[in-house]
C-alpha cells in the first residue's frame, strides 16, 4: 500500500472511530433548538468537536508518544493520573452510550429485545474485534466508513432540499457558547487524545520503515481527512435539524428526533437506513475506544503483556454491558458533571503541547492546568446546586454563567507566567 492510500485509509478509520452514533444524535437536536441561529451554534460546536480534536491529533504528531506525554510537563504523576481518568471516563460513559443508542434506535423499535441481551451481544462482538485488532484499522477504513458516509450524505442532501414548515425561533441566549458546550458531549477532544495514540501505534507497527517527519506528516494528513469528514457531517445534521424544527414536538428526545428526521426525509425506508447507520457508527466507536484503552494499560506493564490487553478489553466490555442498560438521556445527563471538570484541562493540555517551548514552560503548564481546574468548579457545581446560590460567582468570574468561567483566567495566567519568565530572562530565544 503506497503512503497516500495508507494515509486516506487511516484517515477514514479515524473518522469512523470519532463518528459514533452517540455523536450522531447531538447535532440534529442542537440545530432543532437553535432554529435560524443554526449557523451560530455551528461555530461553537465545530470548534469543540472538530478543531480542538484535530489539534489533539497534531499534538500526537509532534510528541510521538502516548497520552501521558500530554501531561508530563505538569508532572509525570499528573500525566499518568490524567490519562487513567480519561480512559476510565471513555469506558464508563461514551462506550456504553453507543450500546444504549443502538438499542433505542436500531433494536427496541423492531425486535423488542431487552437491553441486557442486546448490549451483551453487542459487546461480545466488540470484544472479538478488539482482540483481533490487527485487521480493525483496514476494515474500518475500507468498508464501514464509506457506508456510514453514504447513508449520512443521503439524509443530509435530501433534507437540505426538502420543504418543511417555516423554521421556528431558537431557544439559546448564547448560541455560540451553547454549541461549544454541546460539543463536549461528542467526547471528540478526548477522542483526539485517544485516537492519536492508536494512530501512532498503528503507524509504528506497519512493516515499512518511516522516519519521524513522515510519521508526523501522515498523522497530520490523516487527522485532517477525518476532521474534514466530521466537519461536513456535523454542519449538515445541524442545518437539517434546524430546518425541521417546526415539524416535531419541542419535547422530542435526541434519539427520537434523529429517527423522525430520517423517516420524514427518507420515507418508509428511513428507519431501515438509520438502523444500519446507527449499528455501524456505534460499533466502530466502541471498538476504537476499547482498543485505545487496552493499548494504554498494556503499555503500563514492563512486559507489555498481551494478557493485560485482553483483560482490559474484557473489563471494558463488561462495563459497557452494565452501563448500557441505562437510557441515553441518563448517560448524557450524567456525563455533564464529569465533562465540565475534565474538558477544560484537556483543552489546555492540547493547546499548550502545540506551542513552542519558549511559551509553554513547565511553570506555564502547571499554572494553567491548576487555574483551569479551579475555575471550572463553579461550572460543575451549577448542575448540583440551585443557580441562585452561585450568583455571586457569576458576578465575579466572566462567562461563568455560561459555563465557560475557566477561559479568561487561564488566558490571563498564561500571559502573566510568560511575562514573568521573560522578565527574569529577557534574552531572545
Image (tube, helix red, strand yellow):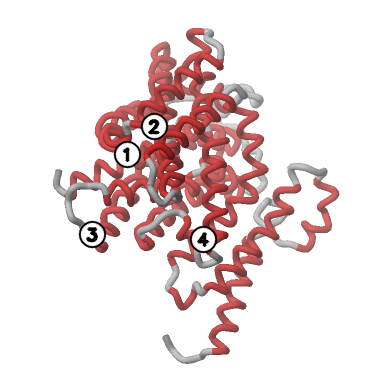
Instruction: Name the outermost residue toward the front.
Output: 303
Which residue appears farthest toward the bottom when viewing the image? 427
Query: Does the residue at mark 2 contact the one at mark 1 (Cβ under 8 Å)?
Result: no
Q: Position of residue 88 (x, y in %)?
A: 55, 42
- Which of the labelled discs sits on residue 13, or is there none? 1
Q: Residue at x 26, y 47 (%)?
A: 205
**Which residue occupies 79% across, 60% down?**
395
* For the residues bearing labels 4 and 2, Cβ distance under 8 angstroms: no
Which residue of the protein is positioned furthest toward the top in this rendering? Answer: 111
User: What residue sits right under mark 4 in the picture?
Assistant: 71
Q: CA distance from mark 1 to mark 3?
A: 19 Å
Quarter of the rendering occupied by the N terminus: top left
Measure how far apart labels 3 and 4 are at the Cα level: 25 Å
Asked if marks 3 and 4 touch (Cβ < 8 Å), the reply is: no
Is residue 205 toward the left or the right of residue 43 in the image? left
Q: Which callout, 2 or 1, points at the residue further toward the start of the chain?
A: 1
Quarter that holds the C terminus: bottom left
Cα separation between marks 2 and 1: 9 Å
Give the mark nearer the N terminus: 3 vs 4. Answer: 4
Secondary element type, mark 2: helix
Q: Position of residue 26 (x, y in %)?
A: 53, 35
The crowding category of the residue bearing disc 3, from other C-alpha atoms within 10 Å (few below 14, some 14 to 19, many at least 20), is few
Which residue does the numbered mark 3 point to in the structure image?
214
Query: Where residue 38 appears, x then y in whole percent?
Result: 53, 41
User: For the residue labelled by badge 4, is the local secondary structure a helix, a strand or a loop?
Assistant: helix
134, 243: nearer the viewer: 134
Q: Residue at x 27, y 51 (%)?
A: 204
Task: Describe residue 220's horizontal placement relative to residue 406 as left or right.
Answer: left
Q: Nearer the viewer, residue 52 or 343?
A: 343
Mark 4 or 2, nearer chain start: 4
How many residues crowd mark 2 within 10 Å: few (<14), some (14–19), many (20+)? many
Amino acid at each position: 500500500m503506497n503512503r497516500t492510500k495508507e494515509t486516506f485509509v487511516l484517515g477514514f478509520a479515524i473518522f469512523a472511530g470519532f463518528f459514533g452514533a452517540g455523536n450522531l444524535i447531538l447535532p440534529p437536536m442542537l440545530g432543532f433548538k437553535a432554529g435560524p441561529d443554526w449557523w451560530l451554534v455551528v461555530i461553537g460546536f465545530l470548534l469543540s468537536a472538530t478543531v480542538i480534536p484535530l489539534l489533539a491529533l497534531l499534538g500526537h504528531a509532534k510528541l510521538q508518544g502516548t497520552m501521558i506525554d500530554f501531561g508530563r510537563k505538569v508532572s509525570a504523576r499528573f500525566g499518568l493520573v490524567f490519562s487513567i481518568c480519561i480512559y476510565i471516563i471513555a469506558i464508563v460513559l461514551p462506550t456504553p452510550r453507543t450500546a444504549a443508542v443502538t438499542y433505542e434506535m436500531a433494536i427496541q423499535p423492531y425486535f423488542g429485545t431487552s437491553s441486557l441481551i442486546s448490549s451483551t451481544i453487542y459487546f461480545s462482538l466488540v470484544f472479538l474485534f478488539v482482540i483481533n485488532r490487527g485487521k480493525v484499522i483496514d476494515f474500518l477504513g475500507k468498508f464501514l466508513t464509506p457506508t456510514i458516509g453514504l447513508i449520512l450524505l443521503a439524509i443530509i442532501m435530501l433534507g437540505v432540499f426538502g420543504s418543511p414548515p417555516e423554521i421556528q425561533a431558537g431557544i439559546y441566549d448564547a448560541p455560540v457558547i451553547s454549541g461549544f458546550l454541546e460539543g463536549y458531549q461528542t467526547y471528540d477532544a478526548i477522542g483526539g487524545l485517544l485516537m492519536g495514540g492508536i494512530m501512532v501505534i498503528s503507524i509504528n507497527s506497519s512493516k515499512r520503515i518511516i522516519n519521524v517527519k513522515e510519521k508526523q506528516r501522515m498523522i497530520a494528513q490523516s487527522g485532517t481527512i477525518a476532521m474534514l469528514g466530521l466537519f461536513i457531517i456535523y454542519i449538515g445534521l445541524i442545518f437539517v435539524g434546524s430546518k425541521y424544527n417546526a415539524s416535531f414536538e419541542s419535547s422530542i428526545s435526541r434519539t427520537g428526533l434523529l429517527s423522525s428526521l430520517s423517516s420524514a426525509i427518507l420515507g418508509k425506508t428511513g428507519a431501515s437506513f438509520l438502523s444500519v447507520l446507527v449499528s455501524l457508527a456505534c460499533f466502530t466507536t466502541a471498538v476504537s475506544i476499547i482498543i485505545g484503552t487496552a493499548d494504554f494499560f498494556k503499555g503500563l506493564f514492563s512486559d507489555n503483556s498481551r494478557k493485560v490487553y485482553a483483560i482490559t478489553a474484557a473489563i471494558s466490555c463488561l462495563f459497557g454491558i452494565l452501563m448500557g442498560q441505562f437510557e441515553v438521556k441518563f448517560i448524557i445527563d450524567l456525563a455533564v458533571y464529569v465533562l465540565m471538570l475534565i474538558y477544560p484541562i484537556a483543552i489546555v493540555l492540547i493547546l499548550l503541547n502545540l506551542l513552542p517551548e519558549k511559551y509553554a514552560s513547565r511553570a506555564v503548564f502547571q499554572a494553567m492546568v491548576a487555574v483551569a481546574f479551579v475555575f471550572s468548579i463553579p461550572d460543575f457545581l451549577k448542575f448540583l446546586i440551585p443557580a441562585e446560590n452561585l450568583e455571586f460567582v457569576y458576578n465575579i468570574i466572566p462567562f461563568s454563567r455560561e459555563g465557560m468561567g475557566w477561559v479568561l483566567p487561564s488566558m490571563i495566567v498564561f500571559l502573566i507566567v510568560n511575562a514573568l519568565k521573560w522578565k527574569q530572562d529577557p534574552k531572545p530565544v
